[in-house]
Image (cartoon, grey):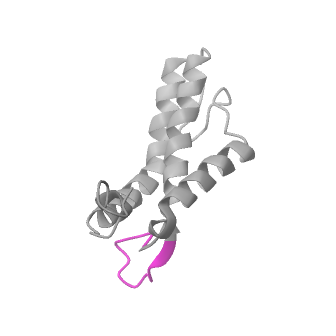
Amino acid sequence: MLRLGERDEDIPDPSDDERTAVYQALKQTLGKYDTYRTVFDSKNLEEEAIHASLANDLTNIYFGVLCPIRAWKKGADPVCVIWELRLLFYTHWGRHLLSAQKAILDCLSDPTSVVNTIGTKGGI
């Protein structure tokens, strides 16, 4: 029986190669939109903003969701899979999700963003 905060060993982490491949592909695709500024603790008014990576956020979200689903498909106990998803949402990838949402919104609101040039001359 798992205790609060413990991870299930039936849910493996991705390999370093797999994580690096996804991160590099996202980083290359995002280009100048990969880096953004954020704070870790928005309640701390004295905390300085830091640089963060949208590719890193998306990679962490992707594997935070994918690995438990892979384990479920291989026969892991669904209760353990849900536990892992919930645990990692609150302790890890949920924070990446919140930061990524703001960065994506800022990217989409930039009229020069590549996603806003689809179908225009010089766009994608």
Relative placement, left or right, of 81 versus 107 is right
**Which residue is at 42% across, 50% downward?**
94
Above or below for 72 versus 117:
above
* Residue 28 in sight in this render: yes
Q: Tell me the quarter of the picture where residue 110 sits.
A: bottom left
> Which percent across, then down, holds residue 111?
26, 69
Name the quarter where the N terminus is drawn: top right
Relative placement, left or right, of 79 versus 109 is right
- Hey, which residue is sitting farthest front in the picture? 121
Q: State whether the magenta stretch is mostly helix, strand or loop.
A: loop
> Which percent across, then down, holds residue 51?
50, 75
Name the quarter where the C terminus is drawn: bottom left
Range covered by the magenta-colored residues: 38-51
**Magenta run includes residue 40:** yes
Q: Tell me the quarter of the picture where residue 40 sits.
A: bottom left
Above or below for 103 versus 58:
below
* Residue 56 in sight in this render: no
**Which residue is at 44% across, 37% downward?**
86
**Which residue is at 32% across, 70% downward?**
112
> Which percent across, then down, holds residue 21?
66, 48
